Amino acid sequence: MKQLKYGKFLDIIWTAKVELRKVHMAEMDWYMAKYANRQNESNAEELSLKESVLELTFNGLLDSFHKLDQIVVKDQFLWANYGSFFKIKWVEIKWHMDASTHEEDLHNMELVHLNSSFSDGYNDLMQQLEELEVHFSK
């Protein structure tokens, strides 16, 4: 019986890890398109598509985090909040890139800090998911 219960928990945790990786990959893909668009503005359609994909992957991540809250950790909004805060890190990058020029970014470190914050958020969430997996694998 324990194996059935924790097997379901592990499946939800693994799904959340996959969704988190998808967001990370989609964000990198979007970022490269956004960076290129800032330099020549010739790929607006491609950029729009990549942003839509990223939004969809965030939706998948948030859905998997809701399942973690409701089924695994039984905390109403802990993981949902983590997911929202993680998405905000991307929104801050987007806002910055929309408001500044490539040349401005060469002279300050704000974009570097925003990218580091997103990367740190990814690593923190992945580590917490790994800890959940270890906890329910015993």
Image (cartoon, rainbow, N blue to C red):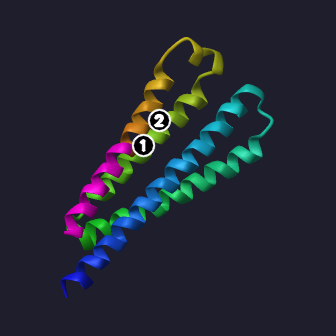
Magenta highlight range: 123-138
> In the drawing, does residue 81 fall left or right of residue 23?
left
Q: Amino acid at mark 2?
A: Glu
What residue is at 69 percent from the left and 44 percent from the top? Answer: 47
- Looking at the rendered image, the quarter that the C terminus falls into is bottom left
Q: Is residue 61 visible?
A: no
Q: Which mark is residue 88?
A: 1
The residue pinned by badge 2 equals 92
Up the image or down, 106 lies above or below 8; here it is above
Furthest-front residue in this view: 138
**Which residue is more in the foreground, 71 or 12?**
12
In the rendered image, which quarter is residue 42 located in? Answer: top right
User: Quick one: 10 or 112, which is closer to the camera?
Assistant: 10
Judge whether residue 92 is colored magenta: no
Q: Tag 1, which secondary structure?
A: helix
| In the depicted structure, whether residue 113 falls above or below residue 137 | above
Disc 1 packing (10 Å; few <14; some 14–19; many ≥20):
few
